[in-house]
Amino acid sequence: MAFGKASRTDARRTSSSFCSTTTIVVFVALCLVGIWMMTSSIVNPLEMFPLSSKSDVKDQVPETDSKDNSGGITEDLDKLVQNTQGENPAKGNENTRDESEDASKTQTYSDRNGKVDEEKIQEGGDANLETDTGTFADGDGKNMEQKSDVQDNNSEQNSKEAENNEQQEINGEKKSEEVEKSDGDTTQGVKNKGQIEEKVEENGGKETGQKSDDNNAGNQDKDQGSNEVFPSGAQSELLNETNTQNVAWSTQAAESKNEKEVQASASSKGQTVGYNWRLCNANAGADYIPCLDNEEAIRKLRTTKHYEHRERHCPEEAPTCLVPLPDGYRRPIDWPKSREKIWYSNAPHTKLVAFKGHQNWVKVSGEYLTFPGGGTQFKHGALHYIDVIQQSMPDIAWGKKSRVVLDVGCGVASFGGYLFDRDVLTMSFAPKDEHEAQVQFALERGIPAISAVMGTKRLPYPSKVFDVVHCARCRVPWHIEGGMLLLELNRLLRPGGYFVWSATPVYQKLPEDVGIWEAMSALTKSMCWKMVAKTKDTFNRVGLAIFRKPSDNKCYKKRMENNPPLCQESDDPDAAWNVPLQACMHKLPVDPNVRGSQWPEQWPLRLEKTPYWLNSSQVGVYGKPAPKDFEVDYEYWKQVVSKSYLNGMGINWSHVRNVMDMRSVYGGFAAALRDMKVWVLNIVSIDSPDTLPIIYERGLFGMYHDWCESFSTYPRTYDLLHADHLFSKLKKRCKLLPVIAEVDRILRPEGKLIVRDNVETINEVENMAKSLHWEIRMTYSKDREGLLCVQKTMWRPNTS
């Protein structure tokens, strides 16, 4: 029994051993077949395993390799943003933030040839951001392919290890899965990074990606404005201006013969952190205007006979301090209510109330300063006075023929403020003098004005641009010293334009008034100005005289005496930056194709029509024939404003009234805002092509300025500043830090700054804005071009 049992046991052992051997052989064979199949599948992963199963890239990333990148990039970005946000908006925002924090890391990709492409992304962006966003349209697919190649290499290596050992094979399969997962995650990261490089941050811990303002901004599509943020297709040349030597218009710096030397400071490259802001220590306090409150320079003046002490005297070194806020400052009242009243705490000055209250300039009413709309010559309101002018000279035709007006000695600018009701744009100016804060009141009311004086230098405007010049008791001695100051108005007045003079010499018979009237009558006659109306306003008990400038040179040739003399042929009437006044008149153009020989189209047709004196032989700023340049610029800004600025930035435009385009070309940005309740002051930099006459021809207005110096306005006077490729150009001539300090000075708290520039400059400005505790509302970059929107806050440093 025992032996029999042992025999059965041996037989079972032999059978079991045979079965085990057979099983092992079969298992090995199956493994070899499996290894072969797996090796084959890894060689062509795109055929066997769709990438969408891991990262959904197929659904989210459009096929851009076969498309024209110039027209489709932004649309692809929009689709990608929508898909990403639809899956997990919060996660997308976190990824964007994480990538911003990890921007200094080096990423290495392998291409199909086994080469390694290493790209470094500097912290905060910098010029290398082009690889982040600029190459997204065709580069994202490329990066995906690179990732797949990495997966191929890793999988092949794993399969070779599997051939040597079954356990290694299993590990290799697990490792391959891990690589796929890692690859999917990395591709998602690249997708988020390439998305739009957009950061919309707000203080107070609000979630990134949300844009808010006081009203309904949360309902706006955050990417709605990205369709036309940058030029595309035929408009791409707008980012590359031609050499100014080839442009049809010379720069203001070149035109102005006695312009002071342009300071050449070191570039501010590389400034990122460590800004030490302090409050300005100036006697002017919260009203500090550096170029008008330079007490040291004013003390050194030899004479103030010609109001030299009211002219610009900029510090040798531009200030980098911050102007303090008045106690109790609050956000200004919105237009149009602001025309009638402002917060007293924002401009706490009462001297004008005592001096001019009886003339209805300004009054105090509780916590407000109120403006009844009166003036020295129109105590009972500006609108009646404006209508009297129209009735006296119907050809003036407010808002049709006469669109752009210069108001000399404007007071609180009620004349210009009520001309808005007649569709007229008025450039008002007055000195910073004993009439305390008159220009500040005007700007706080939402009325355009600058601090300036008729002294020893030309005003910063081109010749032959104003349709009407107005003076109501402006206290300018027009008749003295050969009529030098009136001859400056003659330079600015359009041929055939009108000078409206409302002053006591017109209607009073005191000996002094009679003498001034006789002198003015003789002077205007010698200048060939014709008095076309002399009227007395019985309601306001004042009188006014209206003179018309000639349209041709016939009268000049008939004069018995060459006094005032005609200017030398070499004298450029458009040279206006720091150019001394001369007591002479410039000849008028006779060629019908030259600016000034014809009156512009009536408003509003003149806004869109190409000026008649632009011709195809002239090279525009962007390198195209001038008429085409003009048209392309206008179409571009219409798209940018409508699709991006008005709806895509979370700006509450009901709070925006005073706007400045810090570097205007043809006035396209201002023209695109024509239907908004805003006015735009167009600044043409002195080192840019002199296109300011084109802006005036369109029925818009502006002035020349050098942004290496302070601007002639009070602090906190603009709601929105727009800088298109200004700062990168300025860095070649002066330091950027004082310019940003000046931006802070003139921008109101809660005001916005929109910057369009190269990525390096965008990041530099963004760093400065952060150091000022401003809110970064949005950043956007593509192809080394960037867009930044920031909002000033109430923050002020504690030290001075």
Image (tube, helix red, strand yellow):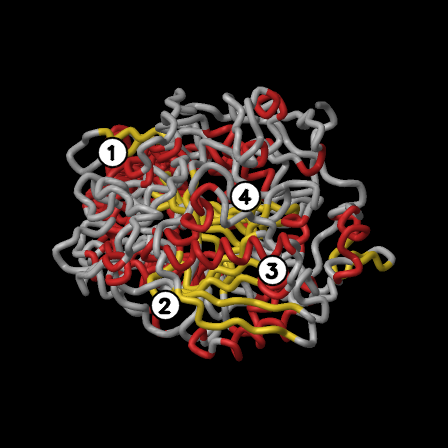
Element under label 4?
Answer: loop
Alpha-carbon span between mark 2 and mark 4: 27 Å
Element under label 2?
Answer: helix
Disc on res. 110: 1
- Looking at this view, is 772 or 462 the one in front? 462
Element under label 3?
Answer: loop
Alpha-carbon span between mark 1 and mark 4: 63 Å
Alpha-carbon span between mark 3 and mark 2: 33 Å
Decide if residue 630 is on the left or right side of residue 764. left
- Looking at this view, is 248 or 141 the one in front? 248
Q: Which residue is mark 3?
A: 503
Q: Amino acid at mark 4?
A: Ala
Alpha-carbon span between mark 2 and mark 1: 55 Å
**Nearest to viewer (mark 1 / mark 4):** 4
Q: Which residue is mark 2?
A: 607
Residue shown at 23%/32% (left/top)?
A: 160
- Which is more N-terminal, label 4 or label 1? 1
Q: Amino acid at mark 3?
A: Ala
Q: Which residue is mark 4?
A: 452
Residue shown at 54%/39% (left/top)?
A: 743
